[in-house]
Amino acid sequence: METSNLNIFFAEKFGCSGSLYFAPGRINLIGEHTDYNNGFVMPGAVDKGITAEICANGLDIVRVYAMDMPAEQQYIEFAINQESKPNQHWACYIFGVCKEMIKRGVEIKGFDAAFTGNIPAGSGMSSSAALENVFSVALNDIFADNKIDRFELAKIGQATEHNYCGVKCGIMDQFASLFGKKDCLIRLDCKTLEYEYFPFKPEGYRLTLINSCVKHSLGTEYNERRESCERVVEHISRNHPGVDSLREATIDMLLEVKAELDETDFSRAKYVIEETERVLTVCNSLKEGDYDTVGRMMFGTHWGLSKEYTVSCDELDFLASLAEEYGVKGSRVMGGGFGGCTINLIPESIHDAFVEKAVTLFSEKFGHKPEVYEIVIGEGARKL
C-alpha cells in the first residue's frame, strides 16, 4: 500500500512523523444479517483498507485529518474528556473508540493523526470497521500498558457503532478486519466468538465485486430488521425457553408462531434461520471443493435478502439475475444492503466476458457504469 503521500501530508500538518497502522475492509462470502442474530458468518479481510499515521502529542486533545474528505470537512479536534460527539460523522468513529477504550481502563492521551483509505464508499466492504480498527489497534499499541486482546478490540468497534454512530451492528465486520488471514475465510460463531479458518484460493475461479454505485445507508432500516428478529424471538421463546436468538430457532419453531406474527417479521426471521444453515452448508462444501453447492447457496442468500429480508434494490437484483443467466457460479448482494456490491464467484473461463457484459448492460439500463474490484484475501489489522 502507498504511504508516501500520507507521510508527507502528516509532516506538513503536524511537523513531525508518527507510526503507521493499517486495517482492512472485508468481504463476506455468505452469512448476511446473521451476526446480530448470534449465527454464523464467513468473512475474510481484503487488501483494501485504511492507513493511519498517529503519534502522541503531549496534549489533552485529539487532532485528526481525514485526507480523503473535502478540505472543509477534513479536520476535527476534540478534548479527551469531552462528552459530546464531534459534528463530523466520520469523527464519531474515532471519538467512540477513544471513549470505549477509556471505559476499559486505557489511559488515552492526546494524539495527532491523519488517515487515508482505498475502500470504495458504500461498497459494503465495511470502511467503518476498518476506521475503528486502525485506531483501536494504534491506540492499544501507543497507550495501553496492559494490551487489550483482539476479541475485545472487536467489541470496542462494535460498541462504537452502537453508542456513537447509531447502528446496532453485529461483530462480524470488526472481527474479520482484525483476525483476517491471507487466502483464508473465517467461519465465525457470533454467539461464542469461536472461529475457524478455511483456506480459500479456489482454482479456476475469481472472486469479483461489482459495485452498483448505489450508496447504501444503514441506520434506521438496519435497526428495524434487528427489532423484527428480536420480536420473533420473544414469541418463540414462550414455547422454547432455551431460544434467546434466531440462532437457536428452527423453521418448525417459526411456523408454530406464524399466526402471531405479522408477515414482515415472519419473512425476515425465515430468511435468517435459513441463512444460518446455508453458512454451515458452505463450510462443508469448501472442505470438499464443491463450488457448485457454494454458488447455489450464494444465489439462495441473494434472493432471500431480496424477497424476504428486503434489503436489495433493482440494480443489485439485475446484477444477480444476469450472473445466473451467464453461468456465474454464485452471486449475491454483500453487506447490509440497500445498494453497494454483488460478490461473484466467476469461472475463469467466462470472467472477462461476463464482466464486460455486466458493465455494458448495467450502464444501458441504469445510466451509469458499475465499478469492478478483483478481491484478494489478505491479512488483518496491524502496525506497518
Image (tube, grey):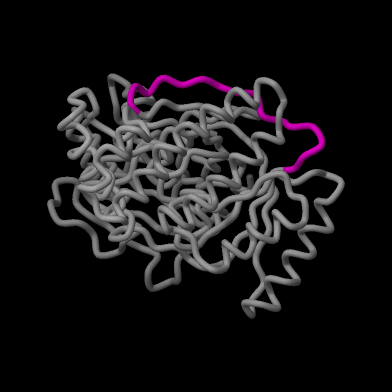
Q: Residue at x 65, y 63 (%)?
A: 371
Q: Position of residue 51 (x, y in %)?
A: 51, 46
Q: Is residue 315 above or below residue 165?
A: below
Q: Position of residue 155 (x, y in %)?
A: 30, 33
Residue 198 among those drawn in magenta = yes
Camera sees residue 21: no
46 and 346: which one is in front? 346
Q: Is residue 289 above or below residue 68?
A: above
Number of disc labels: 0
Q: Position of residue 143 (x, y in %)?
A: 30, 30
- Which of the 4 image quarters holds residue 169? top left
Camera sees residue 182: yes
Using residue 324 as the reference point, say whether residue 78 is left or right of it: left
- Which of the 4 image quarters holds residue 287? top right
Residue 342 among those drawn in magenta = no
Q: Residue at x 75, y 46 (%)?
A: 346
Using residue 47 as the reference point, say whether residue 255 is left or right of it: left
161 and 345: which one is in front? 345
Using residue 273 as the reference point, say whether residue 3 is left or right of it: right
Looking at the rendering, in which quadrant would you find the N terminus?
top right
2 and 233: which one is in front? 233
Q: Position of residue 381 (x, y in %)?
A: 49, 34
Looking at the rendering, in which quadrant would you find the C terminus?
top right
101 and 290: which one is in front? 290
Q: Residue at x 57, y 54 (%)?
A: 118
- Which of the 4 image quarters holds residue 153? top left
Q: Is residue 80 above or below residue 75?
A: above
Q: State which region is magenta.
A: 191-206
